[in-house]
Image (cartoon, rainbow, N blue to C red):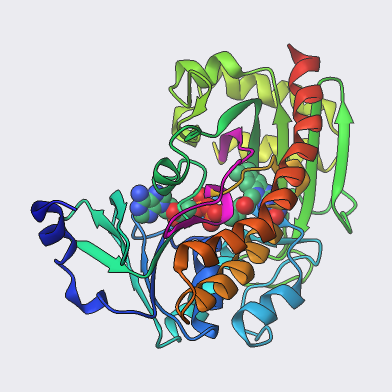
Amino acid sequence: MSTKRRSAASADTAYERQGTAVVVGASLAGLMSALALSRAGIDVTMLERVTAFPRTGASLGGVTENMLVRLTGRARTDSDATTHDDVQSWSAIYTRLRSAVEADPRIRLRHAATVQHVGQDADAAWVSTADGRTYRAGVVIGADGHRSVVRRSVAPHHPDATFAGYMIWIGLADESAIAGRHRWPRAVDILYRGDGCLIGYPMAGPTGSVAPGARQLGWAWYDAGRNDLLREKGCVSGDVVQHTLRAADVPEATLRELADEADLWPSPWRDVIRDCVDRRAIIGTPIAEYVPDRLVNGRLALVGDAAHVPTPMTASGFGMSLADADAIADAVAVGLDGQPMAQALKDYERARLDSVRASVRSGQQFSRSFAGQAA
Ligand SMILES: Cc1cc2nc3c(=O)[nH]c(=O)nc-3n(C[C@H](O)[C@H](O)[C@H](O)COP(=O)(O)OP(=O)(O)OC[C@H]3O[C@@H](n4cnc5c(N)ncnc54)[C@H](O)[C@@H]3O)c2cc1C
């Protein structure tokens, strides 16, 4: 290592000791990994580039109450916003994990910390952030999502997730805006019409109430017909997903088309979609996929969407991230207990790689047929 690099790597001396991990990204996979590492007795520094997460109405299927109790070490309380059993709101899950992290003395969480560079030598791994700090630890774990910076150092030959050829429109409406005229759905509806697919789900309201009148209906509309729009708006460049299409950037003409095309869907979904369109309360997420051939490199490792990106149709991203968190904590604990860290992380890769590749690939069958039918 050069002298210049060594002095940069020494800037944050508080974390230059054994028994520590740096986790890049403090969304769901990062929070789960930090909690698992802490349970294994490891001190964690989490670095997150944003200061607050937008409340988009995004939701996750496949997340059970048992998973959340195991992760946070406590059952749901009245103050935890809850949702329908089949689908949990992203923000309710995030809030519970974040509270557990904040209560954990082994975990230090830093916001407005954008990681730009990642490095390692025989003794340690480190990251440097946009504000000029360097954090050093026994291991650096990339939980920095589908456009991961850490992945560039783990798999430089295969750094990018690729566009799957379609997007999802996402919205959330209050029951009170549509109530009285429709049957209230009891479970997730998965509907196919023409070239489209709609997933609709009942949810508790923002205060966690499931009382009639206080609930919400969320929906995700799979759409392979707007790839030109995604490219025009810079959401997809080449075959790489760059960002979500924000509500403010959806053209008026597209909103009108969506309102018309909502006729495809039965009530209440068509009314819910039109309510969201009228309020311009929708976002469009281009779907990315990533099949990894590697999860670690030396003292660097990947978890969550940094490691693997399945289509949301599999509803498996959260469960895969949870399994990653458990496995990485086991491996790092062994690595800090005498076994060479690189060797211990290879055990993590051996434990997870085949399974995550199979999950992403199973979703690619849906993606190919869905994107293909609209082409
Ligand atoms: C539309 C959609 C619907 C989905 N539905 C489901 C579902 O129903 N069920 C399911 O199980 N999964 C679903 N998923 C997947 C699931 O959301 C993810 O797999 C899961 O939340 C784990 O995400 P993550 O924490 O790895 O990544 P992300 O949520 O992308 O978080 C990455 C974090 O890293 C931070 N970051 C990025 N770069 C840097 C940097 N350089 N420095 C510091 N911080 C950085 C980001 O700000 C962010 O906070 C869905 C995904 C999408 C897109």
- Report if residue 321 is visible in the image: yes
User: In the image, is 94 to the left or to the right of 374?
Assistant: left
**Along the line of sight, which residue is nearer the eye, 47 or 260?**
47
- Identify the magenta region: 282-306
Q: In this rendering, is residue 140 above or below 18?
A: above
User: In the image, is 210 to the left or to the right of 68?
Assistant: right
Give the percent coordinates (x, y) of residue 175: 73, 55
- Residue 184, quarter of picture: bottom right
Q: Is residue 204 inside the magenta stretch?
A: no
Give the percent coordinates (x, y) of residue 61: 75, 56
- Report if residue 57 is visible in the image: no
Query: Which residue is pictured at 79% across the width and 67% down the height?
Result: 212
Query: Which residue is pictured at 72% across the width and 35% down the height?
Result: 221
User: In the image, is 15 to the left or to the right of 76?
Assistant: left
**Along the line of sight, which residue is nearer the eye, 355 or 187?**
355
Quarter of the figure with the C terminus: top right
